């Protein structure tokens, strides 16, 4: 008897207890469909807990350094493009909506609706990454990527930088200006890790679109779609925290 | 027909979803890594036989102790009991057919193997010399060794550990058989549950810390880099936020083994079952709030030092509750001295010494004197080798008949247990003295006056090596020639003993019902009487 028909071989239902009454997606070590759905759901929530701890390390670092280098964080946050940031937030929230609709379609067994929702979510996810690329290239042009070519110009001579000038920045002392690099280190680490989660999510979405077209999720067994939905909303929520912390809260000082 | 004899192709093992087969795969893999780590430990002890750095260059020595630490901690101690014995037994102890997520369980083993191969690759292509603690800015700016691949290996091994922990928590919550309430769970399950909480909450923090180190080394971000305003002490906080709870990930499952063994060989219910169960949870909770005691000399504020010192001493309370309750379990029990019990006694003594010296180190004044000396090395090895490894061997012997259906040879294994105990004390006790005399850790050479004790330690290590080789030999031998064990050779009460050995793939012919109390030896006598009546 195999534990999980998808990964083992041989005759999966040749022996053992009677499977006749069970739906085909009930794995043999569960007593009932309810237990199976309940279990995988709980596992997903636990996995999201580990994700919170993963991002928690970054948020801790942000909290500490923001306290220490407040003027540097204010000046550096003026360099972020609030238009693209807001647009991206909208894109991402919309993708969460289409994902939630997708889960509903799966639950109510609407195959074409599910496929459409997944494709929309996929496209919006790619759109988010596209906008993020535009923002990253701005940072590269201005030498605001930490590391070798980092430039302090925008913070030592704010008048030479349109964004800093528009915000009315005063020149920072050299010592504090150098700490803007910490801000951008955190900016790239946090948004980069978030983008990595988006890329993973989009890849899974691609796989799901094919499976959904084959009707795999509209049989009443919707755990996979539901759990992926949880993951997608989680990645969304991380952005909901990143956006104000990086773009908004230090802006009007 | 059982889970071993069912199908025998290589693929039936490599693609299995059966928790028992995955446990066996893990058992073989972690034994392999244990002997790699052990060989490195042997090199360290050989180098320290003489005061000069003569066996190897000092930078080679740095690599050897780093790889010893990385392999022993991430590839042996963390997965040891949970991934092998725990994987095999937790579903059986709660009366389930398998872990909740069999594919994730298999994935966890593959991640472990991938990470292990990467670590070996690192070792062959030049190694890493930062110490297993990856201290910044050393690891990010000043060494040219393979920090990145080692970091990646630890990162991947971390996911393997997260998946094991997650699987355990879900299984214990959702897969218990009818009648199996929380307070009928064996204490082994409780302690693995506590360890799983630590794995699930702690490991991701290590993961992000490694990511930040990697980004700092490659593109040069500045989160830990003081030249940019980053703080290396933040690295210490994040690293120890995982790595201190990690020692409880390592020891808690071992404590679970000891509870089972002590109860079985004293023929008594564990004294203060509820207290022992909750002490596991308490260790897990307190374990998250003591990490900064690794940083007393690193410039954290005096107030933090006082708070963390106090919290550190509080962890000693639940640990002591366990030791006391095991002792009271022995009191008026009918004790027998089979091999698992000998190892359990070894555990109790050595863990107590290791734990008490931990309290010395939690005291700030003493810590500032003793930190970074051999006292730390001795303390850590008393807990991990004297404690955890003894518990692991105890568990392997105890459940060997269940896993393989064969008994191990009793006399020679008792000898091995005694040899291990003697060898251990010879190896590590002198290191307490060396530490108090001020010998620093992590150096290839030392002043000549320390040589006598170092010779003792190296001699002890060779005895210890024999003690570890013996079980490998006779356990392998017993696979073919051992006596047939029968279902319940120890007359133990756990559900896993009430089914055949080795078990069926589905563990139980019918879903069991837990209709008696845990560790209920009178119930077991009753069952036996019933069987005799029905046969005769």
Image (cartoon, coloured by chain):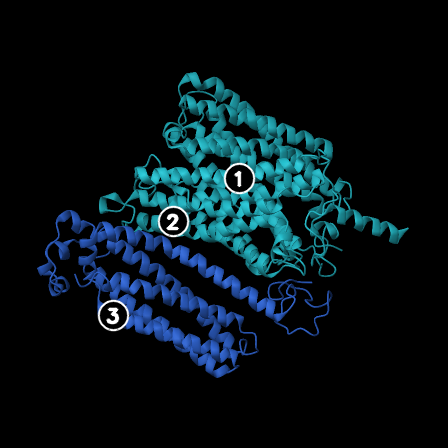
Mark 3 crowdedness (10 Å alpha carbons): few <14, some 14-19, many ≥20? some
Establish if B104 lies above or below B273: below
Display colour for chain A: blue
Q: Of tags 3 and 1, which is closer to the observer?
A: 1
- The disc placed on residue B210 is 2
Instruction: Residue at 50% x, 46% y: name it.
Output: B282
Label the cyan chain with its letter: B
CB atoms of marks 3 and 2 within 8 Å: no
The numbered disc on residue A84 is 3
Instruction: Count neighbours of disc 1 (C-alpha within 10 A) and say few if under 14, some if 14 to 19, many if 20 or more.
Output: many
Q: Secondary structure at mark 3?
A: helix
Locate residue B15, reporting x and y percent.
Answer: 61, 58
Front in this rendered view, residue B370 or B444: B370
Locate residue B444 relative to residue A90 in the image: left or right.
right
Of all chains, the one bearing label 3 is A
For this orientation, the residue located farthest to the left is: A159
* Residue pointed to by mark 1: B319
């Amino acid at each position: 008897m195999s534990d999980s028909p998808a990964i083992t071989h041989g005759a999966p239902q040749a022996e053992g207890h009677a499977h006749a009454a069970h739906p085909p997606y009930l794995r043999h070590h569960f007593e009932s469909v309810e237990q199976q759905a309940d279990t995988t759901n709980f596992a997903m929530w636990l996995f999201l807990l580990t994700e919170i701890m993963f991002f928690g390390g970054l948020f801790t670092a942000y909290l500490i350094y923001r306290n220490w280098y407040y003027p540097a964080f204010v000046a550096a946050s003026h360099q972020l493009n609030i238009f693209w940031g807001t647009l991206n937030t909208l894109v991402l929230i919309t993708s969460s909506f289409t994902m939630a609709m997708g889960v509903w379609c799966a639950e109510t067994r609407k195959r074409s609706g599910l496929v459409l929702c997944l494709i929309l979510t996929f496209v919006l996810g790619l759109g988010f990454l596209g906008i993020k690329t535009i923002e990253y290239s701005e940072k590269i042009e201005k030498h605001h990527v930490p590391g070798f070519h980092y430039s302090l110009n925008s913070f030592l001579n704010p008048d030479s930088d349109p964004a800093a000038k528009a915000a009315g920045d005063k020149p920072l002392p050299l010592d504090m200006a150098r700490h803007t690099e910490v801000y951008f280190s955190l900016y790239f680490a946090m948004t980069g890790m978030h983008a990595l989660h988006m890329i993973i999510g989009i890849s899974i979405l691609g796989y799901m679109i094919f499976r959904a077209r084959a009707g795999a999720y509209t049989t009443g067994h919707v755990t996979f779609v539901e759990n992926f939905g949880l993951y997608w909303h989680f990645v969304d929520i991380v952005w909901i925290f990143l956006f104000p912390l990086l773009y908004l809260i230090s802006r009007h000082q | 027909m059982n889970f071993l004899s069912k199908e025998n192709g290589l693929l039936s093992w490599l693609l299995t979803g059966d928790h028992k087969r995955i446990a066996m795969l893990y058992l073989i893999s972690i034994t392999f890594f244990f002997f790699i780590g052990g060989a490195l430990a042997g090199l360290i002890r050989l180098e320290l036989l003489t005061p000069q750095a003569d066996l190897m260059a000092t930078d080679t020595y740095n690599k050897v102790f780093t790889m010893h630490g990385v392999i022993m901690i991430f590839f042996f101690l963390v997965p040891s009991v949970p991934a092998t014995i725990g994987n095999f037994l937790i579903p059986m102890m709660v009366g389930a057919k398998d872990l909740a997520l069999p594919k994730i369980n298999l994935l966890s083993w593959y991640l472990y193997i991938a990470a292990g191969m990467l670590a070996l690759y690192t070792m062959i292509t030049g190694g890493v010399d930062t110490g297993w603690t990856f201290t910044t800015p050393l690891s990010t700016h000043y060494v040219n060794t393979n920090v990145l691949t080692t970091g990646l290996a630890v990162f991947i091994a971390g996911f393997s550990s997260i998946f094991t922990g997650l699987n355990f928590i879900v299984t214990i919550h959702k897969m218990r058989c009818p009648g199996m309430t929380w307070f009928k769970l064996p204490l082994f399950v409780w302690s693995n549950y506590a360890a799983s909480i630590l794995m699930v909450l702690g490991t991701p923090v290590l993961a992000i810390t490694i990511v930040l180190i990697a980004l700092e080394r490659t593109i040069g971000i500045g989160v830990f880099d003081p030249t940019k305003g980053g703080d290396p002490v933040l690295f210490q906080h994040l690293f120890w936020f995982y790595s201190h709870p990690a020692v409880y990930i390592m020891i808690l499952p071992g404590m679970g083994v000891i509870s089972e063994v002590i109860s079985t060989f004293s023929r008594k219910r564990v004294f203060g079952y509820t207290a022992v169960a909750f002490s596991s949870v308490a260790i897990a909770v307190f374990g998250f709030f003591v990490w900064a005691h690794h940083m007393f000399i690193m410039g954290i504020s005096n107030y933090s030092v006082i708070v963390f010192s106090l919290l550190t001493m509080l962890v000693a309370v639940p640990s002591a509750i366990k030791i006391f309750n095991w002792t009271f379990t022995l009191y008026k029990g009918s004790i027998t001295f089979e091999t698992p019990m000998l190892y359990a006694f070894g555990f109790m003594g050595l863990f107590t010494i290791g734990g008490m010296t931990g309290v010395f180190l939690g005291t700030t004044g003493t810590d500032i004197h003793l930190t970074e000396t051999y006292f730390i090395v001795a303390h850590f090895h008393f807990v991990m080798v004297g404690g955890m490894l003894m518990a692991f061997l105890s568990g392997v012997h105890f459940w060997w008949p269940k896993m393989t259906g064969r008994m191990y040879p009793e006399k020679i294994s008792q000898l091995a247990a005694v040899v291990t105990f003697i060898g251990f004390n010879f190896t590590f006790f002198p290191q307490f003295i060396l530490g108090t005399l001020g010998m620093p850790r992590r150096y290839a050479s030392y002043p000549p006056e320390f040589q006598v004790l170092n010779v003792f330690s190296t001699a002890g290590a060779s005895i210890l090596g024999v003690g570890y080789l013996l079980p490998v030999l006779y356990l392998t031998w017993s696979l073919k020639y051992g006596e047939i064990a029968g279902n319940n050779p120890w007359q133990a009460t756990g559900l896993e003993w009430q089914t055949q050995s080795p078990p069926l793939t589905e563990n139980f012919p019918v879903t069991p019902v837990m209709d008696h109390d845990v560790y209920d030896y009178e119930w077991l006598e009753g069952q036996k009487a019933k069987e005799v009546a029905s046969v005769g």
